[in-house]
Image (cartoon, rainbow, N blue to C red):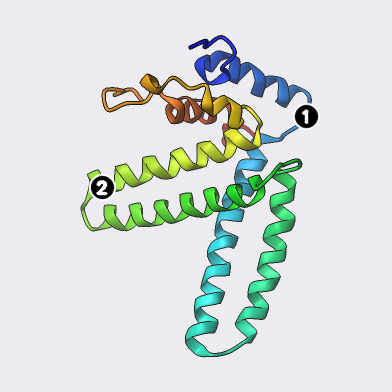
Amino acid sequence: METNNNPIQNLNQLIEKVDEMKKQDKMDLSSDQDLSIAIMNLVSIEEHFFFTGAKTGKPEYYDLLQEVRKMRGDLLRKIIKEYEGEVWCISKHLLAASMRLMEVGTKQQGMGKKEEARELFQKAYDLYSLFWGINMKVIGTNDVKKIDIGAVNKHDNEKKGFMGKLGELVKKAIDCCIE
């Protein structure tokens, strides 16, 4: 299998691509990361308005849900400027699933189940990394097909496979502490 054309194979090329995007002012990744966390919370607020409306029988909660949904859509458009197919919905669900896994992981940690919590946190980060990989256009469906199946297996202790490389990209490219 040819790996030279696969952007996932070379982390340094991914980081260079992100650095180039930063220089061209295509993305303010620190602000966009904060915005993505806000969007995660808005999805959760939508869910709470839904369940509260259903549990109380008060339709005004559904009206509030629609207001929050509109806000979430407006903010998501600030990060996802161009998309094809169902990337918009995929992105929303990646953020929502990441947030839920973080919450469940936090509960597990609070119950003293630290290993379960770490596994959930890693899954949350993997989904979050996938969100950024797709929306920074450093991966696409064609790139995913080129990943060597041997790159991701149970012996990959350092997570150098697909998700591990995306995670490394997010760590190096998106530093929320840089003002």
Measure the C-alpha gap from mark 2 to mark 1: 39 Å
Q: Is residue 51 left or right of residue 35?
A: left
Q: Secondary structure at mark 1?
A: loop
Image coords of residue 100 (percent x, y): 44, 56
Q: Which residue is mark 2?
A: 116
Residue 130 in view (yes/no): yes
| Total numbered circles | 2
Residue 139 in view (yes/no): no
Which quarter of the figure has residue 81? top right
Mark 2 Cα shell of 10 Å, populated few (<14), some (14-19), many (≥20): some
Image position of 62 with respect to 128: above or below: below
Q: Which residue is mark 1?
A: 25
Q: Residue at x 22, y 51 (%)?
A: 113
Furthest-front residue in this view: 1
Q: Amino acid at mark 1?
A: Asp
Image coords of residue 60 (percent x, y): 64, 85
Q: Amino acid at mark 2?
A: Glu
Q: Secondary structure at mark 2?
A: helix
Q: Is residue 117 left or right of residue 20?
A: left
Image position of 70 with respect to 6: above or below: below
Q: Residue at x 67, y 59 (%)?
A: 72
Which quarter of the figure has residue 154? top left
Q: Residue at x 28, y 52 (%)?
A: 109
